[in-house]
Amino acid sequence: MRIAVIGGGAAGFFAAISAKTHHPKAEVVLFEKSNKLLSKVRVSGGGRCNVTNAQPSLKQLADGYPRGDKLMKQLLQRFSNTDTIKWFESRGVPVYAQADTRVFPTSDNSQSIVDVLMDEAAKLGVTIMLNSPISRIENARDIWLYFGSEGTAKKAFDKVIVACGGSPKLDGLNWLSSLGHIIEPPVPSLFTFNIPHSDLAPYMGLSVPAAIVTVEGTKLKAEGAMLITHWGLSGPAVLKLSSFGARLLAEKKYDFTVLVNWVGEQNHQRVWDTLQSSVTSNPNKQVQNLRPFELSERLWLRFLVKAEIALDKRWGDLGAKHFNRLTSLLTNERFAVKGKTTFKEEFVTCGGVSLSSIHKSTLESIHVHGLYFAGEILDIDGITGGYNFQAAWTTGFLAGQLG
């Protein structure tokens, strides 16, 4: 049997390894359009590679996929985050989970993951062809792939696994729609918010441990740590919000208002009560010297200045007007977002081959017998934290079974 895998990323490598493992006598050829392999794996997690997420239940893990959660819940039962960890550790790459459930190799070096994938593919005898973009698939008795810089070279295969990642533009998926597949238009996911006209720039690099970010006028809301950047806001809460709101925010052309709750407490009365407790416990202390929330000193001073409270004022001298201003700023500060910025090099798209175009149990095309899909080419994408790599491992492993 002749098997082709299109794409030299995480899903492509795992699909090729799985195909050769399940079908050891088959010829497996991996086509990569560039001269680089596993590019996203190398840069993920700041070069540490966020391999997966250690969520304790498959439901919690599946909830991290704004698109494809129902299918991922089914597929994860067959190859889960636990299976991923066992796979790497059994091949000499121990991993560990952080408190936030992100999983990294113990080496804290993505090269550990790259090396084991490359070594496994080589050991199994997977053939790798670099600088070989696929320009066309022809569905005949065999599946013909047209590749190379001119698109004139061609080769026939019995099975083909498409794992080439997402496309930022719809026309980049024409070669698949021409075969009958429904394509969900791609839009960016996992991006940060540009806030050009605010007072945040001097505070870049500061973070808050638990924020709640809401898109005004919608039901979109996300919680988690948040980071102030020189262009606006980033961090897990913002990235999660951008992921779940990918389509809606694209429709808004990335021009919208976010409401920021800096203290992670949705009950405004509790925030008021916490501020009041400072009066009871430390009435003579200056407001600048006592921070009732887990905020940096610079951020706390920012809120005092915006609330028009003198920094040397004593807690016991604050009135209801001051508490109202502080509570409002801490729980509901408004920022006008004007554009987005891609999160580091980890570009992720929402969209791709519609899940209605595949057999859910095998990931095989319903239009072309013997054609399978894995990874981000499918309309499956996750929030930050190892979810997208887990989708790559799971779909790559299962597509490689060629069921």
Image: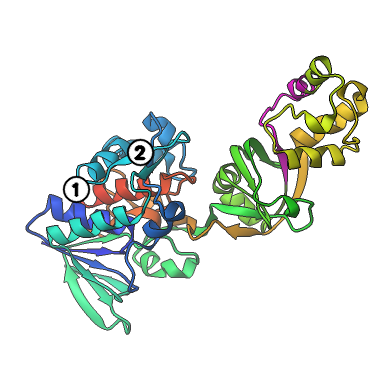
The picture quadrant where one finds residue 103 is: top left
Characterize the local packing of mark 2: few (<14), some (14-19) or many (20 or more) Cα atoms within 10 angstroms.
some
Name the element at disc 1: loop
Amino acid at dot 1: Gly
On screen, residue 222 versus residue 28, left or right, reads: right
Dot 2 amino acid type: Tyr
261 or 113: nearer the eye? Answer: 113
Residue 128 in the image, given as x and y percentages of width and height: 22, 68
Which mark is in front, 1 or 2? 2
Residue at 30% x, 57% y: name it: 114
The answer to whether one can see residue 362 in this image is yes
Q: What residue does disc 2 label?
A: 96
Secondary structure, mark 2, is strand
Q: Does residue 343 appear left or right of residue 46 in this picture?
A: right
Q: Name the one closer to the observer, 48 or 394.
A: 48
What is the CA distance from the residue labelled 1 to the residue labelled 2?
32 Å
Residue 263 in the image, given as x and y percentages of width and height: 69, 32
Residue 359 visible in image = no
Q: Earlier in the sequence, mark 1 or mark 2?
A: 2
Q: Are marks 1 and 2 in contact (CB under 8 Å)?
A: no
Tell me which segment is drawn in magenta.
Answer: 258-274
- Decide: is 94 above or below 272: below
List x then y, in percent, for residue 98.
43, 37
User: Which of the 4 quarters of the picture holds residue 9?
Assistant: bottom left
The residue tagged 1 is: 403
